[in-house]
Amino acid sequence: MIESEFEAEVSIPGLGDQRMAGTLFSPIPERLGPRPVAIVAVPGGTYDRSYWHLRVPTLSGYSFAEHAVTRGVMVLALDNLGTGASSRPADGRAITVHAMADAVGQATAVFERRLRLGSLPVLPALPDSRLAGLGHSLGGQIIVTAQARHRPFGRIGVLGGSFIGNTRIDAESERFAADALKAMAPATWDSGYLEVPRELLRGQFHDDDVPEAVLKAEEAGWTVLPRQAGITAIASGVLAAEAAQVEVPVLVAFSERDTSPAPRAELPLYERCRDLTFFGLTGSAHCHNAATTRHLLWDRLLDWTITSRDSERQR
């Protein structure tokens, strides 16, 4: 597997010029097919790009990126705007889901241009490559919003990203969502960049059978949560209009114990989508990539991405 760092300059309304950071994981060129697939993967709240490439010192098989590369698929794992190594604007309160989606959409356009022209390290020009978007939790909401606003992907996977509302936090409105988040991170509330202790979320994020070594490795990828984006992520129905605008094929996945109060009730929200797939992951809580059953989801997602008939990009 080849790893290379990725950076892209983006310009966000109200925030100006910013920088998006990520890592590209790719097979050697000889392992790429005639129409290779590149997945742009976006993590959820409090996670950086390492969610997609989890390295556990004593265990193997926890990296989605490595798993995808063995199937001949490239993965660009991004740090969201305001998190990880991406730019952190002075006013964290101005970082909305829409701003984060704009950053992902623009970074994807830069990546696609470099991919097709051959200006990425090691890889040749790949003019016939296909792009898919993938997001977990808040990242799923960001991917859907990016698709609604910029249409960069030929298909998208939305993993544990609810457009109804969060079932484990009483968030019937943005005000209640704000109160719930403020209780988790009172000391950093005014900064706009919330430092939410991951330990508070373990019960929702993980089943009891997740090894302690995996939890520790995952928590090493902790990052701040932009306040307004976090509020939107857990408030009921705030982004439903964005889901309704998506026309490309969508795979929606939830676990047995996840954020949506009614996972299959999420499907009608994708009103314009005519190719909609649902996958229910057993033996997992919200953070699927740490679950003992993670490979079931990964294989289903990759099968869907690679072998499904490619659709024209939404125009």
Image (cartoon, rainbow, N blue to C red):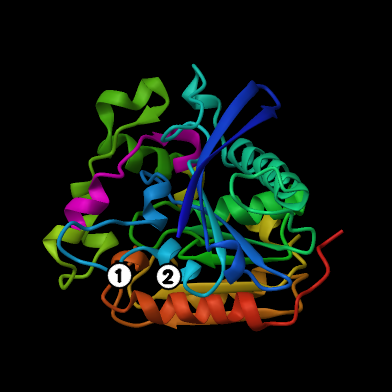
Q: Residue 9, percent across and down?
A: 65, 29
Callout 1–callout 2 Cβ contact below 8 Å: yes
Left or right, 269 with reference to 61: right
Provide residue 256's location: percent of width, then percent of height. 35, 78
Q: Residue furthest top?
A: 90
User: Would you say 259 lies left or right of 165 here?
Assistant: left
Quadrant (top left, top right, bottom left, bottom right) of the N terminus = bottom left
Front residue of this view, candidates 265 and 103: 103
Kind of residue indicated by mark 2: His
Residue that label 2 marks: 67
Which stretch did the figure color magenta?
215-230
In the rendered image, which residue does mark 1 sit on?
61
The front one of 52 and 197 is: 52
Specify whether 141 is left or right of 16: left
User: Which three-letter amino acid code belongs to the residue tagged 1?
Assistant: Gly
* Residue 231 is a magenta residue: no
